Amino acid sequence: MNASLIVAAAIAIQDTILKHEADLESLDRAIGDGDHYINMKRGAGAIVDMQQELSTLSADAALNKIGMKLLSTIGGASGPLLASFFMGMAKVLKEKGDASIDTYAQAFATGVDTIRQRGKADIGEKTMLDVLIPVAAKFTAMATQNASSEEIRAALITTAQQGMLATKDLIATKGRAAGLGERAIGHIDPGAKSCQLMIEAVCKIA
Amino acid sequence: MKKFINKVDDILVESLSGFALAHSDLVQLNLDPNFLTRKQKATHKVAIISGGGSGHEPLHAGYLGFGMLDAACPGHVFTSPTPDQMLAAAEAVHADKGVLFIVKNYAGDVMNFEMAAEMLPFESATVLTSDDCAVINSTYTTGRRGVAGTVIVEKCVGSLAETGADLQACKALGDKVNSRTASMGVALTSCTVPAAGRPTFDINDTELEMGVGIHGEPGRKRETMREADAIIKDVIAAIMDALKPAKNSEALLLINGFGATPLMELYLIYNTAAKLLNEHGIHITRSLVGNYTTALDMAGASVTLCLLDDEIKQHWDSAVHTPALRWGV
């Protein structure tokens, strides 16, 4: 991973968020408070605006910078959570210092684990973690099996899709939809949806 | 939506600027990152910093000044502030005696203040306020929500800090006041978040939302509108159930308006609440009535009861000089 790939990923993420405005807004209006799309758009825009600066940095420094920027731009709960992900990832890349697929899988898993600790949430609580935890597990498993980049990307897109759809039947116990009880059943979690979209977009970068 | 607005995106900065101008004898505003401090930096004490989403004015910046807060960090409307605001505020006001954050228990606020505390290059502690006894978990929280009782926590902790007490003592008092305080709110109408442009929830003329939160988030249940005494009776019952006070307890009663309920009605509520509490054997010896923790333009009110002891009484009564609370000076 290098800075130009990170910039390409940021642009792909912004693109998919903007394309899915209606989806994200209607999901969040149903079981959230209607600001998820605006927050994601503001965050993605802030990162894309930094592309010149990012392109001069090492991968770990760029990811750390992204984390700090999201932390001061998004606010609410998603700001610290997404920031934790990138800062957790940056830490592993810095420590490992290599560019193997194993390291990337480990960095991703550490990023997800940092979110889990920050949000004190786990799988099955109708949050972004219902996408991220299975994707991290799949990524780690496939990296150790020496799967090809194409195989891994395809598998992660499918896993993310399944995790996102699975939130539909869950009662929320963490995040914005907690407190709605049974009323949240039948709705996909907006945070899970945006994570799935971002993972798909990044996996499809040529 | 009919509001005094120039551009929706400018509301926060224009409002903060007006606040800073109006109270230029007491406070100072810093923009980007947004935070406010006392005009005169206190150099002898633990720095008390609070913050949260905007729309609850005068919470928190209205409580900046002698005997209460040293700095306040306002987020966007109903959105928590970000750690860079808390870091810059702490840097501006700390006096090497540590920083105490007073944070209302909402997931976003908790995480943003937590990250700020981790990045802070000096000692800090946090008091989480969770006085709302309406619901255990809400749209915004895990655990009880922090609402109007936060004002009592900020007043008492601010007073203790002024005496030169150390960080742990200030935190201990904050935690104690919070544990002896319970609140519950009732909404008669929704509020309208300016950026959204339409009411947060639908409620008709024959309904009320019992246990509403200060962001217009749902409470215990939607009920039929009825006379004030009957509404307040249920609110007091919930508070009694949460606090389980001993007979003959001494207490502070705070009737807080949500923004669009006139003082006339707030005093009517006080009248009923005080009578009911008296029947429960509670002696109300301190009181506060007004708009202290609002929810934009929501019509409705909350009732807060704080069980007093000598220490809390001493720090409630002590001198305070802020834009929104002022006595003894």
Image: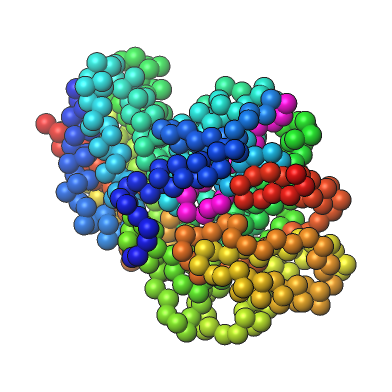
- Asked whether, in this view, residue A171 is left or right of residue A20, the answer is right
Q: Nearer the viewer, residue B274 or B245?
A: B274
x%, y% of residue B258?
54, 64
- Asked whether, in this view, residue A46 is left or right of residue A120, the answer is left
x 77%, y 39%: residue: B160
x 25%, y 41%: residue: A198
Q: Quadrant of the N terminus of chain A?
A: top left
Magenta run includes residue B106: no
x%, y% of residue B15?
44, 47
- Asked whether, in this view, residue B261 is left or right of residue B66, the answer is left
x 57%, y 57%: residue: B293
Name of the residue lying farthest toward the left = A206
Residue A7 at least partly seen: yes
x 74%, y 62%: residue: B287
Q: Which quadrant of the structure image shows residue B252?
A: bottom right
Magenta run includes residue B48: yes
Q: How many marks?
A: 0
Q: Quadrant of the C terminus of chain A?
A: top left
x%, y% of residue A85?
38, 34
x%, y% of residue A102?
31, 24
Q: Nearer the viewer, residue A171 or A26?
A: A26
Above or below, B85 relative to B233? above
Residue B109 at least partly seen: no
Highlighted range, magenta:
B44-59
What colour scheme has been applied to the protein in the rendered image? rainbow
Q: Which quadrant of the structure image shows residue B49?
A: top right
